[in-house]
Image (cartoon, rainbow, N blue to C red):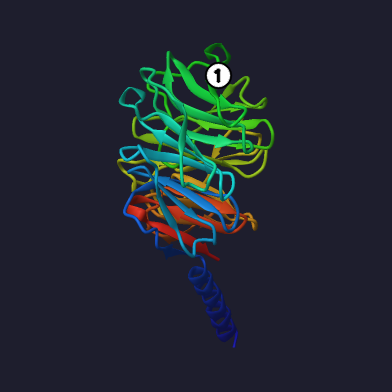
Amino acid sequence: MITFIFKKKRFYLLLILSITTVEAQWIKQNAGTDASFRSICAVNNKIVWAGGTKGTILKTTNGGQQWEVLQVAGAEALDFRDIHGVSAKVAFAMSAGDADKDAARIYKTTDGGKSWRVIFQTSEKGAFFDSFDFWNEKEGVLIGDPIDDKPYILRTLDGENWQRVPKEKLPPVRKGEASFASSGTCVKARNKKLAWINTQSRVFYTTDKGENWQVAETPFKPGETSGIFGLHFYTDKDGIATGGDYKEDKKVSDNLAITHDGGKTWILTEQAKPDGLKESSWVLTNKSLLVVGTSGTGISVDMGKTWKAVDTEAFHAISCYKDDCWAIGAKGNLAKWKK
């Protein structure tokens, strides 16, 4: 009788786990394009923008039931590695690339993507844009590759004009230190004045809207192809850093660290599953931690102590509004999270 009860309980447990596995998955959506994407931004549960190669922008206003493919005139050779949606009408798109090749640009639309205009462009030698984020509809911050041994940080306070943060206000960078333009999440801005920027192994942070910056060490080991790939802060104190190695993206390695003091100190969690590169993360309303990368999607219900591999589908970026989440990757690979 005892054996029967145990087996019965085990059966119910396996049934529950099976149901959870079925419910927690990505449902593919039709992007309508074969462009590759590394940036996505959910404004709310209906409006989502995404930026990709060949000057391509995606937009939905009905929660992903249909996606509109937008081509930015004059940007056919550009790769929009980051995007920020304000509303169904207003959005910013950042082109990553070398300034001396005419690729370092910031665009803005105010008519839902029908037309785009360049609001910032530089030809400064060495400039290469990686990621940006916004505090609100007008104030934002951008990180590019370092120039003159200092981080290259731009700010806008009016949604139009961008200026570089004075170098004397910034900590120096190390040799070879930079950010990865991989998922549009190397910058995280929140509240009214807080922002964080990652390089391969360090996190720069500001508490005064980018006027001054400090830097913190993380346990990630820096490399030309490895380190931190993205940040997500779900409170002013609590944040996630995701990473790995994009050349060995299935290799077992440290791929996630957390902070509970606003980015001053970081500790590694258990390695997120499936093993390998994790580029982007989000914390859902039930405090489950969802991570994506080219090695697949993982979920943790205890903030990184234990992990469950959801799948091995390759995504570069994730963005959520509450529990409505979208992930995007190469060749128009687009999906919505089904709880």
Q: How many marks?
A: 1
Horizontal placement of 107 versus 284: left or right?
left
Q: Quadrant of residue 127?
A: top left
Residue 128 position within the rendered picture, expressed as x and y whole percent measured from the top left: 39, 27
Residue 328 position within the rendered picture, expressed as x and y whole percent measured from the top left: 42, 52
Asked if residue 325 shows in the view, the reply is yes
Q: Quadrant of residue 97?
A: top left
Up/down of 170 relative to 187, above or below = above
Query: In this view of the protein, which residue sits in the foreground, 214 or 274?
Result: 214
Helix, strand or loop at label 1? It is loop
Query: In this view of the protein, which residue sits in the foreground, 89 or 297?
Result: 89
Residue visible at 50% across and 73% down?
18
Quarter of the figure that contains the N terminus: bottom right
Query: In this view of the protein, which residue sits in the foreground, 128 or 10?
Result: 128
Up/down of 298 relative to 91, above or below = below
Q: Amino acid at mark 1?
A: Val
Residue visible at 34% across and 48% down?
36
Quarter of the figure that contains the C terminus: bottom right
The residue labelled by disc 1 is 165
Number of other residues with Cα within 10 Å of mark 1, as a class: few under 14, some 14 to 19, many 20 or more: some
Asked if residue 304 shows in the view, the reply is no
Up/down of 123 relative to 274, above or below = above
Residue 237 position within the rendered picture, expressed as x and y whole percent measured from the top left: 67, 38
Residue visible at 53% across and 70% down?
20
Residue visible at 53% across and 80% down?
11
Horizontal placement of 37 versus 86: left or right?
left
